[in-house]
Image: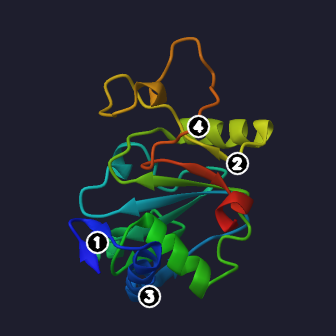
Amino acid sequence: DFCAGAYRSLDMLETVQQHFLRQVRVELIADRRAGPAGWAVFLQCGRSFLHRRWLSPGGRRPWHVIANFYDDTYNQADWADVVLAQSLGTKFSAIHRLLEDRPGFLEQYDYILYLDDDVLITEEAITRLFRLAETLQLQLAQPALTQDSVSAWEVLKQQSGSLGRYLNAVEIMMPLIKREALLA
């Protein structure tokens, strides 16, 4: 059924993907959301994540931090509003599992920013991104990469004098997705 790195059929690919997704487990460790928020940062993280360089502990921000750990360091996440532990997969397989197991879990959020743990960004930049996406009613967006970021696509990097640009791609390490688009 598998031949030289490619699947023989779309049906076979779908079967393999569904088998994998059934194995993904996401455990809710803590839910400390004190009140509603219209935005959330879903931080896929582990032992070497960079949040300590940009996330202020106990900061007053207009968004929740949902920390999804792919290793056993989740017990150190007193800074997160929600703590999850994932057994297998990526942030997107975790979201898939979360939406299947807890359909209303992300319901309160209009926008969710999905960050990898090696992204360095400020809380202010995140808030500006949420506000801009909301104002422009974007379905999908991302913060621009710095000029020194490693990326195959120069178009995803910051352009001087540009507040934002409409593109047909986003960097998978930091997409911002409107809830309706995610559910679709």
Q: Which residue matches tag 1?
A: 73
Tell me the crowding category of disc 3: few under 14, some 14 to 19, or many 20 or more residues within 10 angstroms, Cα based: few
Q: Label 4, label 2: how many angstroms apart (C-alpha)?
A: 12 Å
| 1 vs 107, nearest the viewer | 1
Q: Which residue matches tag 4?
A: 168
Q: Earlier in the sequence, mark 4 or mark 2?
A: 2
Disc assigned to residue 22: 3
Q: In this image, 26 relative to 41: left or right?
A: left
Marks 2,3: beta carbons within 8 A = no
What residue is at 79 percent from the left and 37 percent from the top? 135
Q: Amino acid at mark 3?
A: Arg
Q: In this image, 99 relative to 117: left or right?
A: right
Q: Earlier in the sequence, mark 3 or mark 4?
A: 3
Q: Earlier in the sequence, mark 3 or mark 1?
A: 3
Q: Amino acid at mark 2?
A: Gln
Q: Earlier in the sequence, mark 2 or mark 3?
A: 3
Q: In this image, 101 relative to 1: left or right?
A: right
